[in-house]
């Protein structure tokens, strides 16, 4: 799941009036303002007789999850996810991700306050696609990915969105836990650190939520899905590693290009083998049926590589989330190299 921290980009728009990206910033401000204007307090919506029963049920459950986030996970208490907005579209935003033809390093876009990001977000799919086509014309591998979630890191009260509501209860809870975790600790210009921390809180929060509020079958299914996710992520990681080795060779471009295609064909064949182990489970089929290029594999590590280290930190604090947050914040205050060194040491003591 990809997430953008738009609020910082909105602030940048206010301060960089002469910037060549001014038009982009203005589009962000307009899209952000429109989204904020559509928010309605959940309490008011639940008081309306006209609200559809299914939505009423989902909103009531979302508020139970939101209460749980504060009471049981020690996440911030504010009006984030106490409001709802129907955007009348499938995704909240669309992210453009790009890399050179023979590279697994993402193109970076740098902004004031938030630093450099490995993607560039848009509120319009058409505008995102137009920009992606420009990058393709420059020789980049490009991927336009729809994102269900929207976060301002607590600078505004982020609403629940219709784009989140069709997901499973565990997934909806995970989004809330993940985004609220960003309000606890967020380090400028270190996406891998931020996303791994929030993913750790998300997974621990879902575990606690389902153990307390779900049935045994629900939690068992969640664990099974996490196992499948992990196996797919490992397949994608292995594919990225194979490409990385290929791109470092001295082979001529024509041979690299042919081998690159073969690696992606091999990846899809291995996915078919995975599905047989899953008993035909096919939730990833649509995504895996794409024409792949480098850009599809770029953000895997951002969310997953450091998670095991953060889980070791949580275990060290006896699964006390409050103490864990303090430890992570302390680590975040170190410079990048020191953070990296400490996390490498933690990796050596993983069980």
Image: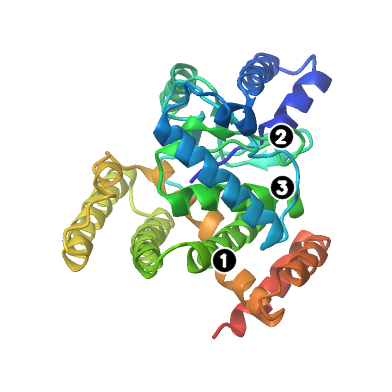
Which mark sits nearer the N-terminus, 2 or 3?
A: 2
Q: Which residue is mark 2?
A: 157
Q: What kind of colouring is applied to the model shown?
A: rainbow
Disc 2 to disc 1, C-alpha distance: 23 Å
Q: Quadrant of residue 25?
A: top right
Q: Are marks 1 and 3 in contact (CB under 8 Å)?
A: no
Which mark sits nearer the N-terminus, 1 or 3?
A: 3
Q: Residue 158: x, y in percent?
A: 66, 35
For the residue pair 340 and 136, the one nearer the viewer reads as 340
The image's mark for residue 36 is none
Residue positioned 58% across, 50% down in the render:
64
Number of residues whose C-alpha sits closer than 10 Å to that of mark 1, classed few (under 14), some (14–19) or many (20 or more): some
Number of residues whose C-alpha sits closer than 10 Å to that of mark 3, classed few (under 14), some (14–19) or many (20 or more): some
Q: Which residue is mark 3?
A: 189
Disc 1 to disc 3, C-alpha distance: 25 Å
Disc 2 to disc 3, C-alpha distance: 23 Å
Residue positioned 55% across, 54% down in the render:
302
Q: Callout 2: helix, strand or loop?
A: loop
Number of residues whose C-alpha sits closer than 10 Å to that of mark 2, classed few (under 14), some (14–19) or many (20 or more): some
How many marks are shown on the rendered structure? 3
Q: Residue 50: x, y in percent?
A: 47, 21
Which mark sits nearer the N-terminus, 2 or 1?
A: 2
For the residue pair 336 and 309, the one nearer the viewer reads as 309
For residue 106, above or below residue 144: below
Q: Callout 1: helix, strand or loop?
A: helix
Q: Is residue 69 left or right of residue 137?
A: right
Q: Which residue is mark 1?
A: 204
């Amino acid at each position: 799941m990809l997430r953008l921290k738009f609020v910082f980009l909105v602030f940048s728009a206010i301060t960089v009036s002469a910037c060549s990206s001014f038009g982009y910033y203005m589009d962000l401000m307009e899209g952000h303002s429109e989204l904020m204007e559509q928010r309605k307090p959940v309490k008011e919506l639940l008081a309306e007789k006209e609200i559809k029963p299914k939505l009423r049920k989902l909103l009531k459950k979302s508020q139970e999850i939101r209460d749980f986030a504060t009471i049981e996970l020690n996440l911030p208490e504010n009006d984030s996810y106490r409001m709802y907005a129907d955007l009348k579209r499938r995704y909240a935003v669309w992210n453009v991700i790009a890399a050179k033809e023979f590279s697994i390093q993402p193109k970076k876009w740098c902004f004031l306050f938030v630093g450099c990001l490995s993607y560039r977000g848009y509120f319009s799919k058409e505008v995102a696609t137009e920009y992606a086509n420009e990058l393709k014309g420059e020789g980049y591998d490009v991927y336009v990915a729809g994102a269900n979630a929207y976060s301002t890191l607590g600078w505004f009260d982020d609403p629940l969105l219709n784009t989140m509501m069709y997901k499973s209860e565990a997934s909806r809870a995970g989004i809330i836990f993940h985004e609220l975790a960003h309000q606890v600790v967020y380090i400028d210009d270190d996406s891998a650190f931020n996303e791994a921390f929030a993913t750790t809180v998300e997974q621990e929060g879902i575990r606690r939520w389902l153990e307390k509020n779900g049935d045994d079958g629900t939690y068992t299914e969640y664990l099974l899905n996490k196992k499948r996710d992990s196996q797919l992520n490992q397949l994608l990681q292995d594919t990225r590693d194979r490409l990385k080795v290929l791109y470092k060779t001295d082979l001529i471009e024509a041979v690299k290009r042919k081998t690159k295609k073969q690696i992606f064909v091999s990846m899809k064949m291995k996915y078919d083998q995975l599905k047989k182990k899953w008993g035909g489970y096919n939730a990833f089929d649509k995504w895996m049926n794409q024409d792949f290029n480098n850009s599809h594999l770029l953000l895997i590590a951002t969310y997953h590589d450091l998670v095991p280290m953060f889980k070791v930190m949580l275990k060290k604090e006896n699964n006390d989330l409050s103490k864990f947050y303090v430890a992570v914040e302390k680590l975040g205050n170190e410079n990048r190299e020191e953070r990296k060194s400490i996390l490498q040491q933690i990796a050596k003591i993983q069980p």
